[in-house]
Amino acid sequence: MLDVCLLGTGGMMPLPYRWLTSMMARYNGQSILIDCGEGTQIAMKEKGWSPKPIDIICFTHYHADHISGLPGMLLTMGNAERTEPLILIGPKGLTKVVNSLRVIAPELPFEIICQEISEPTQTFAFDGFEIQCFRVNHNVVCYGYNIIIHRAGKFDPVKAEALGLEKKYWGRLQKGEIVELEGKTYTPDMVMGDARKGIKLTYCTDTRPTENIVMHAEKADLFICEGMYGEPEKKAKAKEYKHMTFYEAAELAKRAQVEEMWLTHYSPSLIRPEEFMKDVKAIFPNSKAAKDGMSVELKFEEV
């Protein structure tokens, strides 16, 4: 199960009723934060979640509304007596940006590990899940993210018995271990069925529509996508500043055949995004105008 919370849904500046876009996900005792604009800590506090167990923070790009909350977040983690290393992932220049921001957070009781994205598409593997980064089209270098949890096939006792392997070794193969016995090598794939459907979350903001987004969001269980403007007449403005309208996001969701789409990163001038959802749902029915704190538990399919 992947526990997901869209902490804030605003773009450009925090508002009294809308924090800046930030998303937090929790899986198997590990926490991932994507973007950390001003006010992210407050949004997290309102949700009732804590920054202390955050293991990884990913940044789509280095505009202030996506990273200016980092120094305060680091200080809060330090004050909570965190000692575990913190991994930061982001476009090239991450180390320089983080070191600049740390002028006001210089002494921390934990190590910061910066992992810069160097390719148009790049995958970082962690314990039980992957974070896939893919380049999008903004006016600075910007990336979207997939959080992918793979699910192995079921153990097949018939296959195990056919190998003549004693039952006491079956558990090791189920756990992914390789068993060496009497000159023979037994690998997990020899006793496991085909891989089952896992969980996929796609997060994409500050971009024009691209084929790259469609490709990487394909069949996502949840597609969290920028919808800067709901007003149809603002499409020209979206193009000029390299953002997206609700309707462009809906077209991406439709083409990528995702299960569900949440719109986010609203313009400060967009007071009631839900007023535009009728036309959005005409394009992609399972669309939602997200609100701060919106949450979901993404679960594995029952077989």
Image: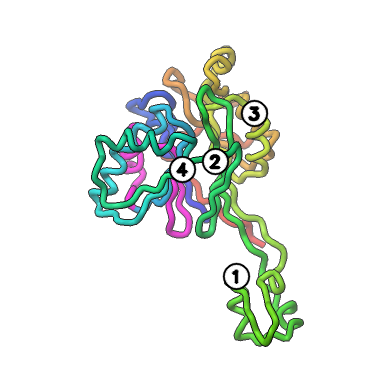
Q: Earlier in the sequence, mark 2 or mark 1?
A: 2
Mark 4 and mark 2: span between their CA atoms? 10 Å
Q: Which label lies toward us, 4 or 1? A: 4
In this view, the residue in front, 94 or 145, is 94
- Write the residue at 30% across / 43% down: 74
Q: Which residue is mark 1?
A: 176
Q: How many marks?
A: 4
Mark 2–mark 1 contact, CB under 8 Å?
no
How far apart are labels 3 and 2 at the CA level?
14 Å
| Residue 36: % across, % down | 39, 37
Q: Earlier in the sequence, mark 4 or mark 2?
A: 4
Q: Position of residue 111 (x, y in %)?
A: 33, 51
Residue 186: percent from left, percent from top: 68, 77
Q: Which sits earlier in the primary sequence, circle 3 or circle 1? A: 1
Q: Amino acid at mark 4?
A: Ile
Secondary structure beneath dot 4 equals strand
Q: In the image, is 11 to the left or to the right of 171?
A: left
Tell me the residue at 58%/26% (across/down).
137
Q: In the picture shown, does residue 303 fall above or below 177?
A: above
| Residue identified by numbered label 4 | 89
Residue position marked by numbered label 2 in the rendering: 145
Identify which amino acid the numbered label 2 is placed on.
Tyr
Taking the magenta stretch, the answer to whether it contains residue 29 is: yes
On the image, the x and y values in percent for residue 145 come to 54, 41
Q: Residue at x 37, y 31 (%)?
A: 19
